[in-house]
Amino acid sequence: MRVRGGRWLALGAVAALAATTAGCSDEPSSAGVAHVESTAPHERPTDEESAAGAQLMTHVALELYDPIAEAAGDGNVAFSPVSIGVTLGMVRAGAEGDSADQLDEFFGGADPDTLHRSLGGATAALEDLAGPVPMADGDMGEIELTNANALWGQSGVTWKPSFLDQLRLGYDASMWTADYQRDPGRARAEINDWVAEHTREHITELLPDGSIDTDTRLVLTNAVFFKAPWPEPLDERPKDLPFTTASGKTVEAPAMTTSGTYRYLVGPGWQAATVPYAGGKLAMTFMVPEEGALAAFEDELDDDLLHQILTGGDPDTAVALAIPRFDLDQRSPVGKALREVGVTAPFTTRTNFEPMTTDPQAQPLRLDDVLHQATVTVDENGTEAAAATGAVFTTVGGAITEHELTIDRPFLFAIHDLEDGTPLFLGRVTDPTVP
């Protein structure tokens, strides 16, 4: 089943879920599944809520970076704090007890009464940055930035209206039905098709074989797609760039070059340069530790430093950049990472998700896993990136200066807006020749 009638929003939340619930009317979709939508009004978040959401996404980025990078060893890393943050926000909307407390701590002690509006505000602010943008040659380009949320609940289960209302209020989300009990394979295919459509076919199997079975009762999904051109194409580097990987191996990486005035920041043992996309509202920042200093920089990186790097620096610094092309396709073990940072109760509870439903067909309900995949392609024309997250629930029981920055060693990158520094994507490239 492919949900084709939904709205495309520039990082606004569109949700699809599957379930039957009191207080909500079912409308058959074109695919014949029941659609359940809360009647609660959705109001656009305020600027203050959006700024608070940007801080939350930065915190999510740094909470998860260490365990995800550790799992990757010397390999590349790419994930979307926005996609994961929104999905876990939806999980929090249906949690209580120890699960709620641990998720609140994961979000940096955020007030649960304002959490959902803040996370939704971050995506709404990013939504405003999509659309036509001027190019350096006078033509018009396009920033594409879309976000979709979907919940798929077991058909026949009664889901609490208060839970659906919270998803509508915070994430503009609604629900579709799936039948995991009778045909888990078809349910998995339906969800994967939805993700594929909303990531422009970049992520076609978020839920791998075996991730859904007859005990599955609910899957919360988020999908993000981003595409942006540079103001003008970067120059192709005549020769491949010798790049020293994290393991000390030297590879030849196709690369491109650019020079101009960019945001530039230098710290102890690292440099950072920010290259805006067309329109000047979104950018990619390259964080480049000195040779052999990757681990030290990653240890130093915290919420404040990342925010400083993504929003600070001298914007009028003359910089000559050599940038390797890279094309990443990474799965991140977010469920394992959450447990490593102390979010364990959602995976073991028998009662903490009763705010979602008390229906005995679904309870006891617990979080089984959080799956995440991200793709990021950077070349001379711009960047194309996609990410998707699935939370699977089961029953169980200054002055102008001159600088050169040749990125010939492992580096971190972030795709973000320039005003608030909301990290849409965060990653690490230790070998640009490996996907």
Image (cartoon, rainbow, N blue to C red):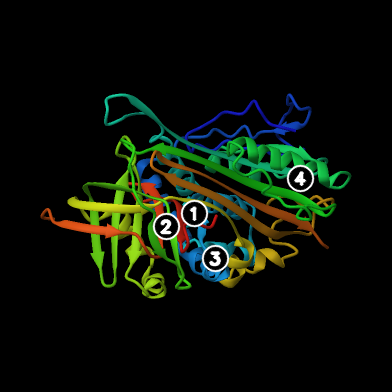
Q: Which residue is mark 3?
A: 68
Task: Judge whether residue 110 can be spotted in this image.
Answer: no
> Does label 1 or label 3 sit earlier along the sequence?
3
Rendered image quadrant of residue 337: bottom right
> Callout 1: few (<14), some (14-19), or many (20+) C-alpha neighbours within 10 Å?
many
Dot 2 lies on which element?
A: helix
In the foreground, 1 or 174: 1
Q: Real-space Cα distance between discs 1 and 4?
A: 24 Å
Q: Evaluate if marks 1 and 2 touch, with contact meaning CB atoms under 8 Å apart.
A: yes
Q: Given contact means CB atoms under 8 Å apart, are the residues at marks 4 and 3 in contact?
A: no
Real-space CA distance between mark 4 and mark 2, rounded to the nearest whole angstrom: 31 Å
- In the rendering, at what x and y percent does residue 386 appear? 53, 44
Quickly name the residue at label 2.
58
Question: Could you say whether the residue bearing mark 1 is in a helix, strand or loop?
Answer: helix
Mark closest to the chain's N terminus, 1 or 2 = 2
Q: Which mark is residue 188?
A: 4
Count of all numbered marks drawn on residues in the image: 4
Separation of marks 1 and 2 at Cα, in angstroms: 7 Å
How crowded pointer 2 is (Cα within 10 Å; few <14, some 14-19, many 20+) is rated as: many
Are the residues at dot 4 and dot 2 in contact (C-beta closer than 8 Å)?
no
Of tags 2 and 3, the one toward the viewer is 3
Mark 1 or mark 3, whichever is nearer to me: 3
The amino acid sitting under disc 2 is Thr
Q: Amino acid at mark 3?
A: Ile
Query: Mark 3: few, some, or many residues within 10 Å (few <14, many ≥20)?
Result: many
Give the amino acid type for the residue marked by disc 1 in the picture: Pro
Q: Which mark is residue 81?
A: 1
Q: Earlier in the sequence, mark 4 or mark 3?
A: 3
**Residue 149 appears at what percent x and percent y?**
60, 41
Image check: 407 left or right of 268? right
Q: Secondary structure at mark 4?
A: helix
